[in-house]
Image: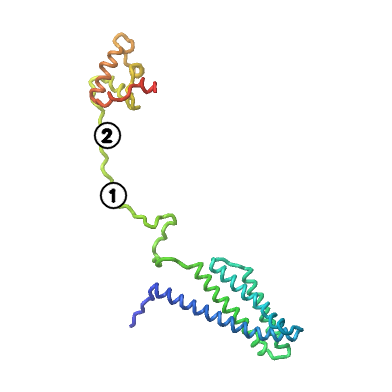
Amino acid sequence: MATSHPIAVPDRRRAVLALTIGAALTTITLTGVAMWLSYEALHDLATGHHLTGARAWAWPATLDSFVIVGELLVLRASLLRRLDWLAMALVAAGSAGSIVLNVVSVGAEVDTTTQVVAAIPPLAALLAFTALMRQIYRALTTGRTGPPRPRDAAPAPADAPLTAVTAPVLPPRPTEPPALPPAYSDPRCTVIRPLYDGGRRPGTGTMRAALTAAGYFGPDGRPLSDGTIRGTLRAEVELLEPVLATYPAEQQLRAA
């Protein structure tokens, strides 16, 4: 059994373009022939109603102009992906007037076939133009750019960058255990150390207030002396973490 091969996308587009151009040329030719046939009938009608010479030749153009202007405006609206109801009304009015007057021009005493023959040229031009504009409008409003997407593919987000690259998912790295605080020989150092967290070297008054709030006093029940605070406690903290001794003094920050 023969296997059918789908038409490639570029070949299909060229085929659609060729068919569209062919339909457009045929519609233009049909419109020209219909206007020529209608023009003769309308000219005879004008001659029979007191228009002679150049006026009889110019009068049919006033009706055909509605059709021409309306068709150009409909084409413009299609290129802009819009619907122009006024342009459609012009085409409809001009075509309807041409159909009616073509039938009137042959007279009421003729048979129905003659009247149908008179109505066919403008009616055929109207239908052909309507079909062509419908195809052009649908092609402009539903056309897609780029290669077709598989049906089961999920649509890309509207705000996703065109060149976005998805980063590979890496397994989580094991977290390092938190550093243990230094082992002070004097437990009162644990009160002094947090005072460095603000990026400053605490003064004696700040350290004394923290120690007093933590319940540390001297042997006589009074607050600890300056020598104990600076020479023993703060000295041990900075001995185990020498970088703390380089912090700006608390008094310097306050002065700044």
Element under disc 1: loop
> Where is residue 170 shown, x and y percent of the image?
28, 49
Residue 211 position by quadrant: top left
Q: Which amino acid type is marked by label 1?
A: Leu
Q: With 143 as the anchor, is 32 left or right in this view?
A: right
Q: Which amino acid type is marked by label 2?
A: Pro
* Residue indicated by mark 1: 170
Looking at the image, is 34 positioned above or below residue 142?
A: below
Element under disc 2: loop
Indicate the quadrant containing the C terminus: top left, top right, bottom left or bottom right.
top left
Visible in this render: residue 212?
no
Camera-nearest residue between 196 and 40: 40
Visible in this render: residue 23?
yes
Q: With 74 as the anchor, is 7 left or right in this view?
A: left
* Residue indicated by mark 2: 178
Looking at the image, is 206 positioned above or below residue 125?
A: above
> Where is residue 137 shown, x and y percent of the image?
53, 70
Residue 253, numbered label: none
Q: Residues within 10 Å of mark 2 (few under 14, many from 20)?
A: few
Q: Residues within 10 Å of mark 1 (few under 14, many from 20)?
A: few
Q: Residue at x 26, y 23 (%)?
A: 238
Label 1 to label 2: alpha-carbon separation: 23 Å
Looking at the image, is 160 positioned above or below residue 25?
A: above
Residue 231 position by quadrant: top left
Q: With 185 as the anchor, is 119 left or right in this view?
A: right
Q: Residue at x 33, y 19 (%)?
A: 203
